[in-house]
Amino acid sequence: MYFSLIIPVFNRPEEVKELLESLSQSDFKEEFEIVIIEDGSTFPCENVVDSYKETLNISYYLKYNSGPGDSRNFGMGLAKGDYFLIFDSDCIIPKHYLTEVSKALKQNYVDCFGGPDKALDSFSDIQKAINFAMTSFLTTGGIRGGSEKIDKFQPRSFNMGLSKKAFEVSGGFGNIHPGEDPDLTIRLWNLGFKTKLFPSAYVYHKRRIDWDKFSTQVNKFGKARPILNSWYPKYSKLTYFFPSIFIMGFFVALILLIFAQDLLLKLYFFYFFVLFLVSTFQNKSLKIGYLSLIAVWKQFFGYGFGFLESFIKINILKQKPQEAFPELFFKI
């Protein structure tokens, strides 16, 4: 099996340098190729790519900006491999990753897989706190941490494998972003392909982000979900409503406080206290434990409000997704 690593990038040459450096340390003994797709960047990474061409088999392509999904499709269309491994440019790849993927595919082949993400010690405290929010079993991010059902896993495109056959049959990613990865997964299911979680195939996901960007990101995640639910109602889950229920419940708790009823608010405090303890223990840091509370708060409220807005526009007002949220759709 010949792997083609597909990496879209937009204005992130330093990230690409870290990613390629990690791949140069791979313990994988077989040949593989790396396909870098520069998605209309004004700060290209071509010089970085050139510096690794003697140690890695890299192809570099510059195209107009059309979003990460279309750029991945572009790269897969030009790749030579029969199995594509898709990463975001802000990932660092453990040296055993390719070996673990090869072993897993030989033992239990599947046309599409996903892996979890972790944080390196070198990441900033905010990055570690956001990673906790996005991966913990105590939050909506558990699916990225590997807690979703293993044999019905929705891979995320920062760490995703896709066979050439599945790409050709499905047509690859659509033009919604975010949400292009669950959209592709569901279309693959409908076409008869299977997906799977490979727990040992994790990456270090750096998440180039601050609090404001994180809030914007999770808000878009929330907006995308009702759109996907309207496209694929069979795969809608009650759990997708939880962040919105969480924030509505919090406002109910504040109203009840006026009437001297504080039990519900105490439950919220207890939940965040547990989050603090778990994050502090996992990260061995009181500071990161505290920052994790901010991250989870922003995660729930950003996603929850985005979901509510989208649910009202899509399900109640019956607006077309592209008209209601043009910022979620790239023009291809």
Image (spheres, rainbow, N blue to C red):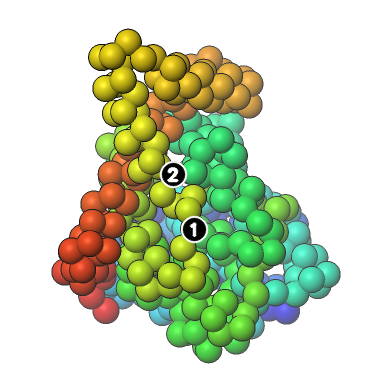
Q: Residue at x 47, y 27 (%)?
A: 292
Of residue 10 and residue 132, the one placed in the foreground of this image is 132
Side of 4 where 16 appears, left or right: left
Q: Residue at x 56, y 50 (%)?
A: 143
Q: Mark 1 sits on what residue?
A: 237
Residue 76 shows in this picture = no
Residue at the limit of the structure toward the front, as seen here? 259
Q: Residue at x 41, y 79 (%)?
A: 74
Tell me the quarter of the image containing the C terminus: bottom left
Of residue 242 and residue 108, the one placed in the foreground of this image is 242
Q: Give the crowd class for mark 1: few <14, some 14-19, many >=20 residues within 10 Å.
A: few
Secondary structure beneath label 1: loop
Q: Quadrant of residue 318?
A: bottom left
Q: Give the crowd class for mark 2: few <14, some 14-19, many >=20 residues within 10 Å.
A: some
Of residue 309 and residue 9, the one placed in the foreground of this image is 309
Residue 312 shows in this picture = yes
Secondary structure beneath label 2: helix
**Residue 227 placement (x, y as % from top left):** 33, 65
**Residue 158 placement (x, y as % from top left):** 50, 58
Side of 284 where 229 appears, left or right: left
Q: Mark 2 sits on what residue?
A: 242
Q: Quadrant of residue 255?
A: top left
Tell me the quarter of the image containing the N terminus: bottom right
Counting residues from the start of the chain, the first of labels 1 and 2 encountered is 1
Compared to residue 91, the image places residue 70 above or below, namely below
